[in-house]
Amino acid sequence: SGDEDGAAHLLYRKNRADTSHKWVLLQTFHDRTQYYADQLIEGGQTYTYILMAKDSSGLESPPTQPITVTIPSDPNAISVKTLNAYVNREGRYIELSWKDSNTGVNEYQLYKGAGGQPLSLWKVVPANVKMIVDESLKINTAYEYGVRAVDKNGQSGPLKKVKTNY
């Protein structure tokens, strides 16, 4: 507020997950601060903020237009820990297997690149699958594979990669 009678600005926050829908006072500013970094947030949550001006007699302005922000989850929280490739030339296949300790995984996205080509989406498998066999191979070709976990909210973890020769 540019009002000369302005004594303070009040910053409020509401968490969408909070069923009480209660506004919480985060900070009271008595100067012309124009920036605030909320350090009390959690990944995967959605927050709404409003700001109100208060004059020296205690009267408050109507709230500003609310601003809603969704904080991304930490992608490392749903990362694949290990990815292994077992080459069987007699059986003409490469077996991929991976391990993680994630809960809430909805699916795994599998990527494949051959002969130095970039990785591209190859298959999507449900969360209970942690091994797959690739039989579409060419002799004397370098392959690169990647896998990433995707949670129930559609957030994906980092891509875990492995290279092998067939």
Image (cartoon, rainbow, N blue to C red):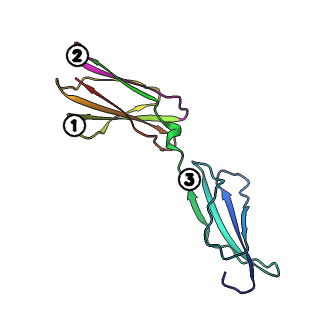
Q: Earlier in the sequence, mark 1 or mark 3?
A: 3
**Which residue has dot 3 on it?**
71
Where residue 66 appears, as percent x and y from the top left, is 62, 67
Q: Is residue 38 left or right of residue 101?
A: right
Q: Which quadrant holds the C terminus?
A: top left
Gap in Å between the C-alphas at discs 2 and 1? Answer: 20 Å
Instruction: Decide which of 16, 39 is in the foreground and name it.
Output: 39
Q: Residue at x 20, y 34 (%)?
A: 115
For label 3, the SS is: loop
Where residue 82 appears, as percent x and y from the top left, is 43, 27
Q: Please give the range of residues in magenta.
A: 88-104
Tell which tag, 1 or 3, sits nearer the viewer: 1
Tell which tag, 2 or 1, sits nearer the viewer: 1
* Tag 3 near tag 2, CB within 8 Å: no
Q: Is residue 19 magenta?
A: no
For label 2, the SS is: loop
So how many labels did they put on this image? 3
Farthest residue in the left direction?
139
Q: Amino acid at mark 1?
A: Gly
Q: Residue at x 71, y 51 (%)?
A: 19
